[in-house]
Image (cartoon, grey):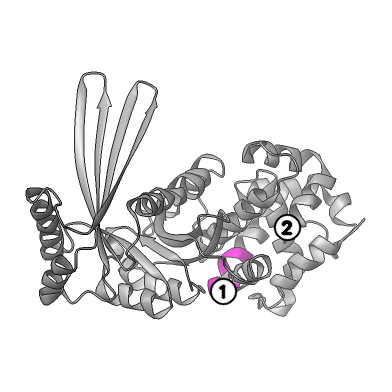
Amino acid sequence: MDSSPVLALKAHFAQLEDPRVERTRLHELLDIVVIAICAVIAGAESWDDIALFGEAKQAWFATFLELPNGIPSHDTFNRVFAALDPAQFRAGFASWVQATLPRLPPQVIALDGKTVRGSQDRYRGKAAIHMVSAWASVNRLVLAQIKVEDKSNEITALPELLHQLALGGCVVTIDAMGCQREIAEQIVEQEADYVLALKANQPDLLEEVADCFTQAEADAYQEICHTAAQTINKGHGRLEIRRHTVLTEPTYLAWLQEGQHWPGLQALGRVEAERRIGQEQTTEARYYVLSRAMSATAFAEAVRSHWGIENAVHWVLDVTFGEDRSRMRAGHAAENMAVLRHLVRNLLEREQSQPGRSLKGKRLKAGWDHDYLLQILTNI
């Protein structure tokens, strides 16, 4: 068989340091990693699943892996992934991303966090881990991720995640947690632009931005630099109307900057969301600060693209990969497996030989068809 996809996979993780002592190394480290990746592609969710998949496919794995002592047990998979250095495992993921996207085209890059709920261990007093990821909206790939340190929050993790990315020409979107001057300044320094959501964690800025829109409306937007766009969505008995407005009025921005000194600020954004379900109607206004004087249509696209990370990554990890059901808790296992799931999701996303096939369908076929599994791995 053609083992080139497996060789490429091994190359990306070749720098992993084996955490085991010499006398306990009954199985090659990269064999363990390759079997785990293949098993998760095919639908495995637990260490038992991974070991069972390896045993069922042992004859096939033996055609391109060393397997000096057969297939590792579920305990071996658990111990190895619990002990692997997460930074090194993320570096292997980053190596794959760099090979896949040597140059990131301009697009919206969404940064958002997700808690791996099943990783919580109340008995041992261990909190669930929280991962922050970067999502490329056009390429539909996870670019990088990092674990939020215990007793910390996303604010401390976001700068480190940003440093891992080549962002030139892109627009970075972050929810209200990331609306910080230092983060805005870093994005601008990395030659990108930002669209940052505002909430109560920046109460003064939020109030002043809302005042700008209130004043503009009072003047009926006469001689005020702005653009506006509206989107309407219908379905399942629900009507959603979103009105997007971008203010670029120099006098407003100058007034705001007198007290705020926000790095790179070029525009203010507002989304008025109206939802109608039967006779019920709700409205909500959300505010943003922007470092690019974009049109309202482009602003609407940036806001909409940010939700891609929720729908195409976080939802998929929970529903298709069963991430929140996972009880992988020992050592670094939860973090390393979160990275592995991101890698597998990316591989499945890039496999487009049969357009329209769901990720679930791809995983089922990969478990049944060795050639198709190798085809997925060719995206390494």
The disc labelled 2 sits on which kind of residue? Asn
SS at badge 2: loop
Kindly identify the residue that appears in the image at 21 percent across and 19 percent down. 279
Q: Is residue 189 left or right of residue 9?
A: left
Task: State the image coordinates of residue 27 (x, y, percent, origin top left).
Answer: 77, 66
Q: Residue furthest right?
A: 1
The stretch of residues the image draws in magenta is 80-88
Instruction: Report helix, strand or loop for mark 1.
Output: loop
Give the left or right position of residue 278, taking residue 308 as reference. left
Q: Which residue is mark 1?
A: 85
Quadrant into which the N terminus falls: bottom right
Instruction: From the image, tell me which residue sits under label 2.
Output: 379
Q: Is residue 6 visible?
A: yes
User: Would you say 380 lies left or right of 274 here?
Assistant: right
**What residue sits 56% from the left and 63% below the top?**
336
Question: Where 118 sits versus 252, above or below?
Answer: above
Image coordinates of residue 101 in percent, x first then y, are 63, 66
Which of the 4 image quarters holds residue 380?
Answer: bottom right
Q: Residues within 10 Å of mark 1 (few under 14, many from 20)?
A: many
Q: Nearer the viewer, residue 25 or 362?
A: 362
* Nearest to the observer: residue 238 or residue 248: 248
Residue placed farthest to the front in the image? 223
The circle on residue 113 is none
Mark 2: give few (<14), some (14-19) or many (20+) Cα within 10 Å. Answer: some
Residues 240 and 121: in front is: 240
Magenta-span inclusion, residue 85? yes
Q: CA distance from mark 1 to mark 2?
A: 25 Å
Q: Position of residue 192 (x, y in %)?
A: 42, 72
Closer-to-camera residue (23/61): 61
